Image (cartoon, rainbow, N blue to C red):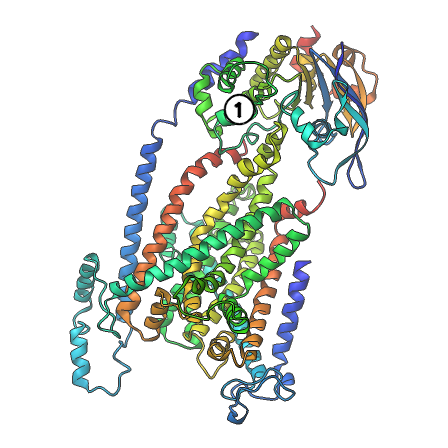
Amino acid sequence: MKMIIGLSILGSLIVICLLGSLFSPYEPTAICLADKNSPPSFSHWFGTDELGRDLLARTLQGMRISLSIGVLASIIDLFLGTLWGTVAGFSNHKVDSFMMRLAELVYSLPYVLVVILASVILGKGLVPLLVAMICIGWIHMARVIRLLVREALCAEYVLAAHALGVRTPRLFFTHIFPNIVGPMLVACMLSVPHAIFTEAFLSFLGIGIQPPIASLGSLIGDALPAMRFFPWRLIFPATFISLLIFSIMLLSDGLRDLYDPKKQLNEGVL
Amino acid sequence: MESNYRHSATSTSVAIEAPQKSASFQAVWTIVRKLAQLSVSLLALLSVCFVIMHIVPGDPFQEEQAVPQEVLDNLRHKYGLDRSIFSQYVSYLGRVLHGDLGTSMRYPSESVVKIIGNSFPVSIHLGLQALVIAVIFGISIGSWSAYRSNRSFDVTMTVGSTFGVSIPSFVIAATIQLLFSLYWPLFPVARWDSFSHTVLPSIALSIGPACAIMRIMRASMLDTLDKEWVMMARMKGVPEWRVLLVHVIPNALLPVLHYMGPITANLLTGSFVIERVFCIPGLGQWFVLGVMSRDYPLIAGLTLFYSIVLYLVHTVIDIITIGFNKRLSQNECAR
Amino acid sequence: MSHLLKVDNLVVEARTTTIIDKVCLEVSENEIVALVGESGSGKSMIARSIMGLLPSEQLSISSGSIRFQDQNLLSLKEQSMRKIRGRSIAYIPQAPLTALNPMMSIERQLLESFDPQFHKRTESPKERAVALLKRVGFLDPSRVMKSMPYQLSGGMRQRVLIAISLMNDPKLLIADEPTTALDVTLQAEILDLLQDLRKEYGLGILFITHDLGIVARSADRGYILQSGKTVESGLTHDLFYNPEEEYTKTLIASLIHHPTLTAAAV
């Protein structure tokens, strides 16, 4: 149920931003000072910002960027995290400890904080931000995957396979991997809203995406000082980013419920 | 036949003797170990911070173009930026251990420690206020939702909390400011001068954590309400209010306690945007300022400070939960 | 002998299915009555219905009566029912590992069940708890009082639960598979304990189990339950030596080599 709502909202949002040019004839970066700060009207559905740029186009561009960064960062993190996590999960105690201690150092600090620090080193902008997020995010993934691998290794079917003489790690992949894929994907999906939020957060503060590229976060950040007089500059990007994150969360929540049999029992009888 | 069960009671009563002796000693030893881990982590963090900052090309003075080269060189010399990295590292460590975190490069009259001293009380006030609000609302609404699960209250609250968790904190902050300060002038717009100034920022900061706590509490309550000992308490004829207050809620609070670590981190990063939106002179503003201007001592000092606070919170939570884990571990084992 | 408990044509329904179908049973003072059935036959459900604590809101008692000392429990309000639970009727649960609150000491859990208004004796709750712990077989009751549940083994916890049930001098004990989670030697001890308690206090015990061996060893009478219906009932001796129903015969046949049965048969 949840999944359906989430999927439909997300789906429509994706469709809207892909077909962006149909909705707005303007370029997101086209400046037109004559029209600056105009309220929503027939020619500018969402109004304009202080440089006369059409807000609809900018909001759509912002959505595209937020979505792509979120998904890209999560997927790359998934790959890196799987590599590290699987190796750690399979290794003996000492190697595993060492690998995880290294990761612990960064893991103990809040994600956003470390990404900010990484941005200081790497610079401002889209690519540095993406690199920063990936560099920090894979550690979280690795932790989750290592836990999954360890749990799966304790399962009895693994013992059975081992007893039957299945040796190579590659063969283990055919036993363990299919069983972890589900939770892995759920974890990946859950990290997407987190990534989108982080990007928006940093752009809001001015550390992330730089103008003239629009990010939903930076749009809100720019709208802040002027929102008393031009509230639409806040309302539209705010609504869209909330809808975006909300729909992805619903979707991943629904996915997670699918994988959790206990919860299904609770909803039913006896 | 009478002697049969007495015999097993004898043998099993010996079994109770063992664990209780060294409980307090173990606790103290664990605390010492945790503190040692803490110091090692902090040292490592400091070093990493230092190394990365100084490996990166460029320094705070790079962007000043209107200043002649000799002045730049002098400034660099003054801050020791022309010495070898290792000697810089050693002197940095020495200074830190003496409680000197350096002076901000952008604002040379302000030492980092002084900055922290001035703005941390503000941030901590904001953070604690938000935490109290979040905990009170989260726990009470979460418990009631679980107790009357799947009825209208629960459904509304669950949907609401999903919104609360997904809407970014700066959006919430901006919206609250728009609605309750600008449109309906109920509260002051910004700054931090009186109690009414603290209301909106605390509420804005508390919403995300409150919704998260609410969800965790609800799930945990649902889980605990199903437990055998809850049914047993009812079988004993214990009145319902006591069943809830004594048997259900304390046990359900444990996962919430675990979550306090991430919540503190959340409050910390949330303070960056809340302080920006409401113009509050707290630590978060300084941090963002330092990041924007690549003010290394400021950034490093504040990061170190944040880490100390966070690691301390984690350690305290770890210590508290050790006792609880022991009691629970033997319960859930499938024998 | 007067009936302590009389269940008459009890029907418990879920949304579309009937869980308990017109079950009748009686328990009198000073006797152990066994309620035998396989998993899913509804035995625990009967126990819960008597105590008025059905597990889910989707289950309801649609007809029948449950009379305890000539009072219809089904017509009682929750307030009054609470005055009976843990006092006149006590419950011994199945899972000793999880039936005790892991965060509370044994002492607190014992004292919690003590009802000063119901209890006519003059001893303090703590004295009563210590006396009962001794009675169920602990040689060092004060140490047990101070322990936490995780420090006790399964057998010990079951004894504690029995002590808890006796705190208010109940007339009727409902023992819901109290020995299922324990190993065989402990089982025998717990059964002997219950026998002694019944002789000493004149208790009526409704013993729910799936193990016919236990029935043979300890029960005076038995009811065989299959899919929510009472298939057969009678004195233990008659059930084992003159079973009438097919189901009863099948159950006994699967026990042919059970040592306890052969011992009881002698």
User: Compared with residue C123, is residue C110 higher up or lower down, i.e. above or below?
Assistant: below
Q: Quadrant of residue B57?
A: bottom left
Furthest residue toward bottom: A34
Q: Which residue is mark 1?
A: C110
- Give the position of the N terminus of chain C as an image quadrant: top right
In the rendered structure, the residue with mark 1 lies on which chain?
C
The type of residue carrying mark 1 is Leu
Q: Is residue A127 left or right of residue B210?
A: left
Task: Name the one closer to the observer, A108 or A59.
Answer: A59
Q: Give the residue at x 39% y 24%.
A: B18
Q: Looking at the picture, does residue C240 appear above or below residue A51?
A: above
As displayed, is residue C208 above or below residue B262?
Answer: above
Residue C90 in the image: above or below residue A227 = above
Q: Quarter of the image containing the C terminus of chain C?
A: top right
Quarter of the image holding residue C91?
Answer: top right
Could you tell me which residue is drawn at 58 percent across and 72 percent down? A239
Q: Position of residue A258 (x, y in %)?
A: 64, 53
Q: Is residue A121 left or right of residue C198?
A: left
Using the rendered image of the protein, determine whether residue C262 is visible from the camera's viewpoint: yes
Q: At 83% across and 20% down in the image, what residue appears? A: C245
